[in-house]
Each structure stands twice: as structure tokens, then as C-alpha cells.
Amino acid sequence: GEDVEQSLFLSVREGDSSVINCTYTDSSSTYLYWYKQEPGAGLQLLTYIFSNMDMKQDQRLTVLLNKKDKHLSLRIADTQTGDSAIYFCAESMMNTGFQKLVFGTGTRLLVSP
Amino acid sequence: DAMVIQNPRYQVTQFGKPVTLSCSQTLNHNVMYWYQQKSSQAPKLLFHYYDKDFNNEADTPDNFQSRRPNTSFCFLDIRSPGLGDAAMYLCATSFSGGRVGNEQFFGPGTRLTVL
């Protein structure tokens, strides 16, 4: 079955690192994504990782994947107030051009000055 | 800039009064999706169009319908909105055959209020 879980809330101070965690249950997932949603806006793709990788770094973002434990994390270095948003992880299964995304419940990140 | 546009951004309707939400895209993507996102919940896929082929999710209520008259436009019709249908509705597009996991591009959403 498909089920993606995240902690609901994270609060950090500006300049600290943030780590947002996600667990998923479907071992057949091919890609895992992190999306950012600012208030009143749609979802913005931040980064993704293919299921045969265990780490990906993209500027301030580091994604770690532990496939054995079905655990995904997003680390944001030097967190800024502009990073305050809801972060969704999502798993996807590819099916001939159609990508079904299953989202987690989202983690609200609050960055205080 | 290429983008996904949703109109209106905010829609108020009355209980039982049909409503249509609109999505257009300039990306020339062949797949279009509609998601429902209730407050503090994850987006949930309602259905998608792969080219002209409509694909409904098994648990999408019959009250929700969709039309795609051409590549650029896709509509979400709610035939008889109930109070439980109040939510943010997100449209997304993707290009099948793309190299990078067929990334989905999202519009800003339409927030629907049902009175």
C-alpha cells in the first residue's frame, strides 16, 4: 500500500540547519520528491532523488535516502526566514509516462529571526 | 514564462450549486492532473488526463468531473458541491517521456469555499 508520513511541525532559528523527515511504505517507488508550499500558493519542486541513490546535494539542500528503512530526509543548511513554508515529501511510481504522486501530510517549517 | 495558470484563485459557491474551476498551461505538456487539498492535509489526486484519455482515481466521488477540450485547458466540474468539498484544488501538468521522473508542475491553486 501507499502511505507517506511526516512530522507536522519544525521550528528553527535563522542560520541553523533544518532536518525534515519522511517515511514511506511502498518499496517499489522509483523517485522520491521534496516539494515546498508557501501560504496560498501551489507546490514547488525543490529536489528529488532516484531510488537507487542514497544521497543528493543541491546547494543548501541535502537529501538522504535509507531505502532499507524507507526513510527520506531533507536537510536545509543555513535556514533563512524565506524558507518558512510547508514541505511535502512524495513518492512516485512510474507507469508508462504517468507518474502518480503520493504525498505526505506535510511539515510546517517555521524559521525565526 | 511557461506556466500553469488557475482561475479563479478564490471561488465561493453555494451548497448544491454547480461550479467549474479552470486550468490552463503554456508548457505544452500532454498530462494534466487535478488534486484536492483539504486544510492541513496532503494533496490527493482526483484524476488525470493522459493526452485525451481520462483516468479517474478509484475513490474520486462521482460529483467530480473533468473536461479537457484541448492540450492547453482542463476544467474541474463539481456538480453539486457539499460542505466537505471546500478545499484548495491544484492543477498540475507533466510531459510523458521526460527524463527526470516526469516532473509535475503545479499551478497556484483555487481555494473553494462552499456556503
Image (spheres, helix red, strand yellow):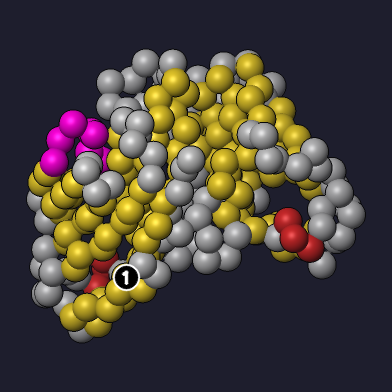
Q: Amino acid at mark 1?
A: Leu
B15 sits to left or right of B37: right
Task: Name the residue beneath numbered marker 1.
Answer: A109
> What's the residue at 56%, 20% (across, down)?
B50
- The quarter holding residue B103 reads top left
Q: Which residues are magenta?
A: A45-54
Q: Nearer the viewer, residue A32 or A24?
A: A24
Instruction: Please tell me whether residue B65 belongs to the stretch shown in magenta.
Output: no
Q: Could you tell whether B14 is left or right of B87 in the image? A: right
Q: Estimate the x, y position of residue A113 in percent, counting from the top left.
A: 20, 83
Chain ID, mark 1:
A
Q: Residue at x 63, y 17 (%)?
A: B53
> Horizontal placement of B84 versus B41: left or right?
right
The x, y position of residue A27, in whole percent, is 33, 36
Towards the viewer: B71 or A73: A73
**Which quadrant of the figure has residue B34?**
top right
Asked if residue B21 lies left or right of residue A16, the reply is: right
